[in-house]
Image (cartoon, grey):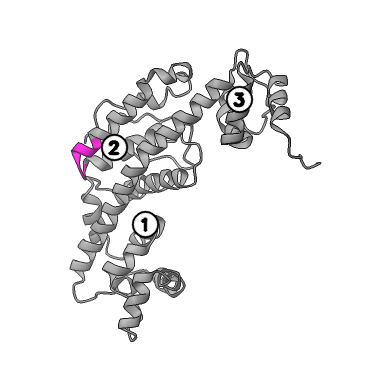
């Protein structure tokens, strides 16, 4: 297959029109294409194509009446949604990190580097730890620790775990040998089943990664279904799509701060209700299925 070549913005507009996309203001369209980019916007005009949502048979032909400005509206909706979600995902990540550090470190009060102890962690985690820690100790705070305490192989948990990624924290948690201790941490979020806890925290992690890399959020689908656990009213379809992920965020937030949870849900409701997005309401409809208040047990 011959590789595609770069095209000018004039040619990009011509291609879009040939495929059936209505462009009423060509000058504005050029400005937007040079600002956001043809490739990035492609994720947002895809829902207006005839083959949506089937990517394997995408023929790039637009549905009748599809408009360039609607694709741009969807882009800005997605951007606004991401800006709402990110701070709350960060709140959950920080809270989980603190929860693990506090409860586990106090449980093993005589083992400040409990994450390196074979009686605490799985053998697999212990074997992988030296390489993982080599990456962590590049951080300035850990470099200072080892300069001050050169005989320490590892810094204490309350220092080391601060520099693990969210994914690394979940991996550490899953490899803790004491199931009762893991259940105690999960109970902080009113989750009694560890499989449910893992599923919901992984959903939060995936949303965090999607947001961090600027990928489209409005039609995100999880590769594995979310286990709803105590969350009531999550439909089968929501367990795989963005609305289910947002419900999980609201539920976990409620167990951290009910005020922040209500605030989170209301911000999303306000975004969806904005007249700016009237033309794309059929596309963002699944997100509007979120409850007016945070999910309860």
Whether residue 282 appears in this view of the structure is: yes
Query: Is residue 184 one of those drawn in magenta?
Result: no
* Residue position for label 3: 29
**Residue furthest toward the right?**
2
Q: CA distance from mark 3 to mark 1?
A: 44 Å
**Which of the two discs, 1 and 2, sits closer to the camera?**
2
Whether residue 49 appears in this view of the structure is: no
Which structural element holds mark 2? helix
Q: Nearer the viewer, residue 48 or 129?
A: 48
* Residue position for label 1: 170
Identify the disc placed on residue 250: 2
Q: CA distance from mark 1 to mark 2?
A: 19 Å
Coordinates of residue 77 in the picture (x, y in percent): 44, 28
Q: Nearer the viewer, residue 232 or 71?
A: 71
**Which of the two discs, 2 and 3, sits closer to the camera?**
3
Residue drawn at (63%, 13%) of the image = 64
Q: Earlier in the sequence, mark 3 or mark 1?
A: 3
């Amino acid at each position: 297959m011959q590789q595609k070549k770069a095209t000018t913005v004039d040619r990009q507009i011509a291609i879009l029109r040939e495929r059936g996309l209505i462009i009423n203001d060509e000058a504005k369209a050029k400005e937007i294409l040079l600002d956001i980019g043809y490739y990035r916007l492609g994720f947002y005009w895809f829902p207006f194509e005839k083959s949506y949502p089937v990517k394997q048979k995408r023929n790039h032909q637009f549905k009748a009446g599809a408009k360039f400005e609607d694709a741009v509206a969807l882009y800005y909706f997605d951007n606004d949604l991401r800006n709402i979600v990110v701070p709350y995902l960060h709140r959950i990540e920080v809270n989980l990190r603190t929860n693990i550090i506090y409860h586990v470190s106090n449980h093993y009060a005589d083992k400040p580097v409990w994450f390196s102890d074979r009686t605490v962690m799985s053998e697999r985690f212990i074997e992988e730890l030296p390489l993982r820690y080599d990456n962590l100790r590049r951080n300035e705070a850990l470099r200072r620790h080892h300069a001050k305490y050169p005989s320490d192989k590892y810094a204490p948990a309350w220092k080391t775990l601060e520099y693990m990624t969210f994914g690394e924290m979940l991996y550490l948690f899953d490899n803790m040998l004491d199931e009762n201790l893991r259940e105690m941490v999960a109970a902080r979020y009113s989750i009694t089943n560890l499989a449910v806890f893992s599923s919901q925290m992984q959903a939060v992690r995936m949303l965090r990664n999607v947001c961090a890399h600027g990928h489209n959020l409005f039609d995100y689908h999880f590769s594995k279904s979310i286990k709803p656990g105590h969350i009531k009213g999550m439909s089968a379809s929501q367990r795989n799509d963005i609305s289910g992920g947002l419900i999980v965020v609201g539920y976990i937030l409620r167990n951290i701060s009910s005020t922040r949870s209500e605030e989170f849900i209301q911000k999303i409701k306000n975004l969806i209700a904005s007249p700016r997005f009237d033309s794309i309401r059929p596309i963002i409809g699944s997100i509007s299925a979120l409850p007016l208040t945070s999910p309860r047990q």
